[in-house]
Amino acid sequence: MSIATDPILEKRPENRVWKKFRSHRSAMFGGFLVTFFIAIALLAPILPIPDPAATDWGAVRKAPSWAHPLGTDEIGRDVLSRMIWGAQASLLAGVISVCIAVALGVPLGIIAGYFGGWSDAVISRCTEALLAAPFLILAIALAAFLGPSLTNAMIAIGISATPIFIRLTRGQVLNVRAEDYVESARAIGLSQVRILTRYIFPNVLPPILVQATLTIATAIIAEASLSFLGLGQQPPAPSWGSMLNTAKNFLNQAPWMALWPGISIFLVVLGFNLLGDGLRDALDPREH
């Protein structure tokens, strides 16, 4: 029997997940979009494009042409080059911010959900207090307090997204903690660390991965918003949000300055959302 049709291999969880994900066409399209933008961001240093900060006063606000496929901006910088380098800032902000949120939120959620008691009360009340403020408003306030820079924007977004992962992880841990296999592990005397690492964390990981993928899309929008307000990536370094901020002053004379960063933000956010939806369906055990 060939490997491709081996029923034992087909029953493996990872193979079932991949098969389910692969059949989700919108998720595959989302994965393609995400991969495309990641590849563009990684290849930016070696692509044959102009310096994103190089100005050309003889080509100010020029329409798309062979020399400048996406046109130029208000001081003659190549929009395509700034778009490609700006992808690095947006994707880095999305990934790093979510990593911060996961690193802070998941351990706190596990502590609150597994141990309960006063630790659960304190963590839950603090989480509810943070959730009382809208995500973007909290991120703007933190970024303004920390100071305008891409690093501080990522920290602000990460802290603002932390309550989402605390609440999600806590709820998942409460469900898993009541399962028979966890009770059996306690009965045979396994340590708390062993139970948490062997039984609790692996079973709460799938929904965390799905939420992380969806939150990256939210973080990218937040970074663009902060850069638009002058609290994120600082000029002359390119960022899609700061490009939109500049472009708003030239919508009549040079609409392409706003068109391309707007489309890019839309597509990369769409990609992560479709990818997250596909992962949610593929990782749902009720679908297998």
Image (spheres, rainbow, N blue to C red):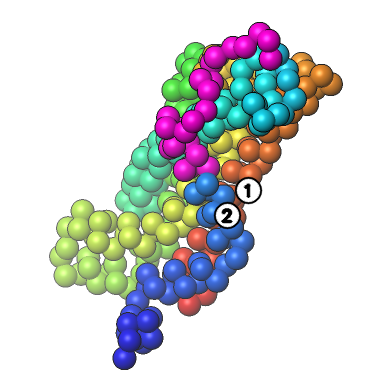
Q: Nearer the viewer, residue 163 or 148?
A: 148
Residue at the image position 43 percent from the left and 37 percent from the top: 42
**Tag 2 secondary structure:** helix
Q: Is residue 171 visible?
A: no
Residue at the image position 70 percent from the left and 29 percent from the top: 65
Q: Nearer the viewer, residue 143 or 265?
A: 265
Q: Give, as a single range, the part of the protein colored magenta.
A: 37-59
> In the image, is 153 to the left or to the right of 14?
right
Residue 96: where, in percent of width, then height? 42, 35
Position of the N terminus by quadrant: bottom left
Decide: is 61 above or below 221: above
Amino acid on which the number 2 mark rests in the picture: Gly
Q: How many marks?
A: 2
What is the number of the mark on residue 270?
Answer: 1
Task: Check whether the beta carbons of the residues at disc 1 and disc 2 lie within 8 A of each other.
Answer: yes
Label the magenta part by its dominant secondary structure: loop
Residue 170: where, in percent of width, then height? 43, 51
Read off the residue under disc 2.
Answer: 30
Decide: is 225 above or below 265: above
Q: Quadrant of residue 75?
A: top right
Residue 191: where, in percent of width, then height? 17, 58
How busy is the neighbourhood of tag 2: few (under 14 within 10 Å), some, or many (20 plus)? many
- Report if residue 89 lies within the magenta region: no
